[in-house]
Image: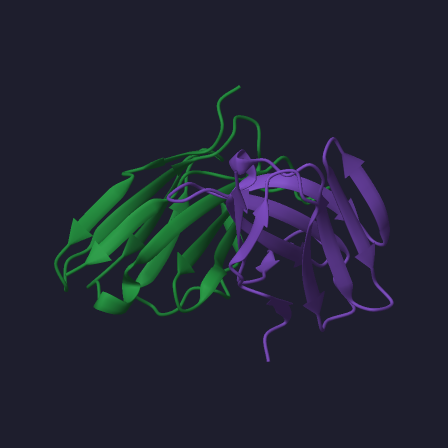
Amino acid sequence: GAGVSQSPSNKVTEKGKDVELRCDPISGHTALYWYRQSLGQGLEFLIYFQGNSAPDKSGLPSDRFSAERTGGSVSTLTIQRTQQEDSAVYLCASRRSPEGSNEQYFGPGTRLTVT
Amino acid sequence: QKEVEQDPGPLSVPEGAIVSLNCTYSNSAFQYFMWYRQYSRKGPELLMYTYSSGNKEDGRFTAQVDKSSKYISLFIRDSQPSDSATYLCAMSFTGTASKLTFGTGTRLQVTL
């Protein structure tokens, strides 16, 4: 079946603009995660969704970052008033359920460049 | 100090060699251990998954977890040029959120 998909694959934006990044998890996977991968920081957790709820937002770096999930499927990560330090690859992962095995499957990522 | 330490490499080996990749960690509460492979400009691909201590083998890949030493390893036998990638270790607690904590990744180059 289809894996995790993300769009756009690349996004270049000017400092101060808002951006939206989209994630489509594997069908039937109820748990969804956003991570960020940057040269200096490696791969870091941002937020976790179970269904449409986000019980763990502890990794969001500032209040400029927000995310939502609708219909227990698609998720959108929004970054407002982008800054150059937001440049990174944003990765989405899904997991079959919040119980048992913690196998997380990643999408290809969105490469964000803030100029 | 990072929770998970991983030598960034690069590690260069000839085709056919046995490769050993390692991570150490500081939090003894980690229970799930994974290895991901990431090709340039691609997302991480789950290679091996282990719960708690022990060994797991899948084809040319063997994952080992030693919780007493807080040390995990990935062995690749008969390495191929197609194995050239960055290998990331990751681990998590049990529980419903279970976010992954990653090492920085080791870049592997298998040469002909």
Say above or below: B33 vs A71. Answer: below
Quarter placement of the C terminus of chain A: bottom left
The residue nearer to you, when weighing B59 against A63, is B59
**Colour in which the image shows chain A:** green
Residue A100 visible within the image? no
Left or right: residue B110 versus residue A13 is right
Residue A113 visible within the image? yes
The residue nearer to you, when weighing A16 against B104, is B104
Residue at the bottom extreme? B1
Coloration of the structure image: by chain
The residue nearer to you, when weighing A14 against B66, is B66
> For residue B56, which quarter of the picture?
top right
> For residue B17, which quarter of the picture?
top right
Left or right: residue B80 versus residue B52 is left
Point 76% across, 42% down: residue:
B62
| Residue B66 location (% of width, % of height) | 84, 60
Residue at the top extreme? A1
Say above or below: A75 vs A61. Answer: above
**Colour in which the image shows chain B:** purple
Say above or below: B31 vs A51. Answer: below
| Residue A109 location (% of width, % of height) | 38, 43
| Residue A100 location (% of width, % of height) | 75, 42
> For residue A70, which quarter of the picture?
top left
| Residue A82 location (% of width, % of height) | 21, 62
